[in-house]
Image (cartoon, rainbow, N blue to C red):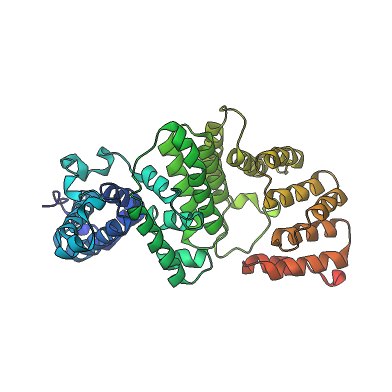
Amino acid sequence: MGPERLSGAEHVNPAAAAERVARSSYGRLLARLAASTGDVALAEDALGGALEEALRRWPSDGVPANPEGWILTVARNRQRDVWKSAAHRTGRPLEHAGDPRTDTAGPADLDLDAVGDRRLELMLVCAHPAIDPAVRTPLMLQTVLGLEAETIARLFAVPPSTMAQRLVRAKKRIRANRVPFVVPDRSVLTERLPAVLEAVYGCLAATGARQDDLVGEAQYLAVTLAALLEDEPEAWGLAALTTLGLSRARSADRPYVPLDEQDVSLWDPRLVAEGEAYLRRAGGGGPPGRFVLEAAISAVHAARMRTGATDWAALRTLYEALLIVSPTLGARVAYAGVVGRADDPAAGLALLDQIGAADFQPWHAVRAELFAQVHRHDDAAAAFRRAAEMSDDPGVADYLLARVTPSSG
């Protein structure tokens, strides 16, 4: 029997209540269901069935006082039904995974806040060495955030069927390798944490430039991870980075504008303050890592809300530190652009020539800006056009093409 019904619950919209549970508690519910068996796919099926049952029953029965506990109970019952079925017993050895019947937590288990949060274990499972690095971020988007395979496929520009197959294979590997839902000791966690952070950062790369409801997913995931880890500087740095990015996220009705040209009155001061608080929490733990430095760079841009100007010298110093820790192609190109603004455009162009990344869209975009600053209009026009052709964001392409003025080509 489910938990006690909410008095007067008929005024609560059942569909909205189910949607809220799916959005806010999906990862916690799935992690709890999968932890006892190691079977992520079975847990997903059980949870999906429980949500469907809620949509069928809540309109007539009323929304329960504890919707999450109700759905967890129904999903557990579905897991047990599958486990007991003859088809399941003949299709999979019993010793291959834990039996959900052995998860005998008491009535408090109906309250997700009264039991351990297993999302950290779920994130570690998604980033386990047995999982292909290319599928770790999509797997985390699906299992922790509950995104559909079709949505994830769109983010990663692959056919939905291909993405669905990759996700299915990853879940089979979790089951076949009996990947445990546990937080390892600190030494092992330190080894595994970079993969988790990279997967969350991949969510930022996949969703950060989109003009839809996914814009906050990376921030939600990063803050959740930092809170679960409590004292990991790089996790708080990533939480700061994603939160500051969310503070200036582009809405669907606004065209693309480069960061240093954006109207700061459109940024969210509450999210800026939140991101800066996360960055302070990330400090004091030794030399800053990649995500702390990237968050500090983002914070310098956010400071323009107070100062009215971008501190290019501070950005140059931070990028120099970032290039020591993480000399990625993106960081090198961005540093050349900052040098061009802080020192001299010719110096920035010289750095870009040294990089020579003609297949990298930002390289052309930064070159175009620096050419324009030194009045090499024909070179600027060609670079703006090439950068526009290589962009997969129509708003970015429109902005770049608009920079090709009649006088420059």
Q: Residue at x 78, y 53 (%)?
A: 355
In the rendered view, would you say 261 is above or below 159? above
In the rendered view, would you say 84 is above or below 278? below
Residue 91 image offset from top left, x and y in percent:
22, 63
Foreground pick, 76 / 175: 175
Q: Is residue 27 visible?
A: yes
Please state, as top left, top right, bottom left or bottom right, where the C terminus lies in the image.
Answer: bottom right
In the rendered view, would you say 269 is above or below 44? above
Q: Residue at x 44, y 64 (%)?
A: 166
Left or right of 31: which side holds 214? right
Residue 299 image offset from top left, x and y in percent:
62, 41
Q: Residue at x 69, y 48 (%)?
A: 331
Foreground pick, 286 / 181: 181
Q: Is residue 402 visible?
A: no
In the rendered view, would you say 316 is above or below 78? above
Left or right of 226: which side holds 79? left
Left or right of 331: which side holds 160? left
Q: Residue at x 46, y 43 (%)?
A: 223
